[in-house]
Amino acid sequence: MINKIFAVDAGKFATKAMAGDERLMFRSNYTRIDESNSIPLEGCSFKVEIDNKTYILGDMGEESDYSLEKQSVLHKMATYTAIAKLGGRDEVKVAVGCPVSIFKSDENRKLYAEYMKEQPQMFKLDDVSIKIKIDKIVVLPEGSGPIYTDERFKNKRVAVIDLGGRNMNFTIYNNRLPQVSSMFTENYGSMDIETLIKQQFDTKYRCSLEDKDVRAILEQGGIKYKGQLEGQNHVKEILEGYVDKVLARVQKANFNLDTMDVVFTGGTSLLVEEEIKKRLSHAEVIKDAQWSNAEGFNKIVRSKFDV
């Protein structure tokens, strides 16, 4: 099926995309390979050729993008791959997200939009050449998804804390309109948690953990060491420290979360939901937090183009 309108939330940890009711999610991991590489791909993995460079993108990718930059080959590659996998061909319209620190600057927002619209010299997905031209693009602030999709937040003052793979975004919305003076982005994402786990568990167990080992520790709530699960309290302390850091940053900006509704979104918020509730009992963690941005972007882009 050929689709023409898309919403893409290309995060550092995972890329989520929608075309109407269709959905696609894959890991934002990548590995650059030689063009002649013929390794069979497993899981949700793709061979992507873009601007004369070849990559494995998805589950079998081995590298993560730790930079703060959104104008990167990873984000363009992930966005075009998502559009192609959801049936996008030729001219398309798309909504994408960016950190609120970029969104609140007209110049930076326009530069990001122009970068994403710039058509690759060549784009192949799994050895098939595909032509995609982004005709219209809507750039929206990360974390805004639930504000657009949930009627409960209409006519309310709501603080939205978006916890992603690399960044934390904070914005206060008044009747669904962002309070520009409240908007900030910090480098507080799940990658921070993973870095702490790697450093501290490497030292304690005298090993060198890979990224996939660290993610297994998070999923298990501890490290499997010689067949036994250990370090649960240590993981819990790291998660608690992370939430404390997030809330301290909001407090530093002189916003009192006790006086307004508070919504947490983004995949990392699910990871620390228990710790959030202990410290901010009235806060709501969006149930499908990792999809909330894509869902909101999807609603906006389809209404904007009268679908």
Image (cartoon, helix red, strand yellow):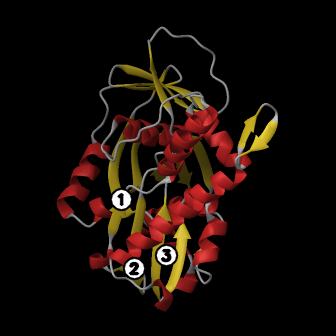
Q: Is residue 115 left or right of residue 148?
A: left
What's the amino acid at mark 2? Ile
Which of the two residues, 281 or 173, is positioned nearer the viewer here?
281
> Residue 171 is drawn in which quadrant?
bottom left
Q: Residues within 10 Å of mark 2 (few under 14, many from 20)?
A: many
Q: Could you say whether the residue bearing mark 1 is in a helix, strand or loop?
A: loop
Q: Earlier in the sequence, mark 2 or mark 3?
A: 3
Q: Is residue 107 left or right of residue 3?
A: left
Disc 3 designates what residue? Answer: 147
In three-dimensional space, the C-alpha distance between marks 3 and 1, rounded to whole angstroms, equals 16 Å
Q: Could you say whether the residue bearing mark 3 is in a helix, strand or loop?
A: helix
Q: Earlier in the sequence, mark 1 or mark 2?
A: 1
Which of the two residues, 129 or 232, is positioned nearer the viewer here?
232
Residues tagged 3 and 1 counted as in contact (Cβ below 8 A): no
What's the amino acid at mark 1? Pro
In this view, which residue lies farthest toward the top?
36
**Which mark is in front, 3 or 1?**
1
Residues tagged 2 and 3 counted as in contact (Cβ below 8 A): no
What's the amino acid at mark 3? Ile
Tell me where residue 245 appears, x and y as whole percent: 45, 65
Q: Is residue 95 left or right of residue 296?
A: left
**Is 106 placed above or below 199 here?**
below
**Which mark is in front, 2 or 3?**
2
Q: Earlier in the sequence, mark 3 or mark 1?
A: 1
Location of the N terminus (image quadrant): top right
Tell me where residue 256 appears, x and y as whole percent: 42, 86
Which of the two residues, 179 or 228, is positioned nearer the viewer here?
228
Disc 2 designates what residue? Answer: 172
